[in-house]
């Protein structure tokens, strides 16, 4: 089964940027997504990418600020996060699934997560 390992989280001030990376252990035809979960809240979809085509889907709150991309040569899925806001704070997870969706229930393989903290 494919394994996912995230990196790149950290602490930044509002308006700053971070780049998250997810290393995928093997070639996969899964759809790849980034999700986040803030304390006391449900996990939510942030962005999903259609493998090969590069077509992306974003939740409304990050449109224009976040960009998901794939680097097939390095087997990574990246999330570039710009103009970060305190409400972007949470644990960010990379996941693989069989649907082009932002719904966590459609994704079956998950990484361990990387923490993002944005201070005001």
Image (tube, rainbow, N blue to C red):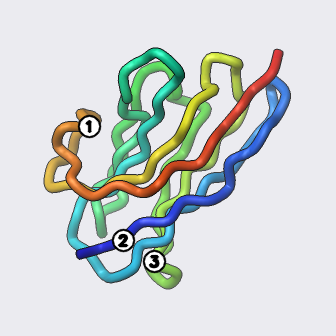
The percent coordinates of residue 35 (x first, y second) are: 42, 39
Q: Is residue 103 shown left or right of residue 68?
A: left
Q: Earlier in the sequence, mark 1 or mark 2?
A: 2
Q: If you read the primary sequence from the N terminus, does the residue marked by circle 3 or circle 2 appear first?
A: 2
* Cα gap from disc 3 to disc 1, whole angstroms: 22 Å
Corner quadrant of residue 67: top right
Camera-near label (3 vs 2) is 2
The circle on residue 104 is 1
Determine whether the residue tagged by mark 2 lies in a helix, strand or loop: loop
Numbered mark located on residue 75 in the image: 3
Vertically, is 13 above or below 23?
A: above
- In-front residue for pair 16/6: 6
Question: Few, some or many C-alpha atoms within 10 Å of disc 3 (few <14, some 14-19, many ≥20)?
Answer: some
Residue in the image at 51% along x and 49% along y: 113
For residue 118, which quarter of the picture?
top right
Alpha carbon distance from label 1 to label 2: 17 Å
Q: In front: 9, or 84? A: 9
Q: CA distance from mark 3 to mark 2?
A: 11 Å
Residue drawn at point x = 22 percent, y = 39 percent: 101
């Amino acid at each position: 089964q494919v394994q996912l390992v995230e990196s790149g989280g950290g602490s930044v001030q509002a308006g700053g940027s971070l780049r998250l990376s997810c290393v995928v252990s093997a070639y996969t035809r899964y759809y790849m997504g980034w999700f986040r979960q803030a304390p006391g809240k449900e996990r939510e979809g942030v962005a999903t990418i259609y493998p090969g085509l590069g077509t992306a889907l974003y939740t409304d709150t990050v449109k224009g600020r976040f960009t998901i991309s794939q680097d097939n040569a390095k087997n990574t899925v990246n999330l570039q996060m710009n103009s970060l806001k305190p409400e972007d704070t949470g644990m960010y997870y990379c996941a693989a699934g069989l649907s082009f969706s932002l719904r966590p229930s459609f994704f079956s393989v998950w990484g361990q997560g990387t923490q993002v903290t944005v201070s005001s």
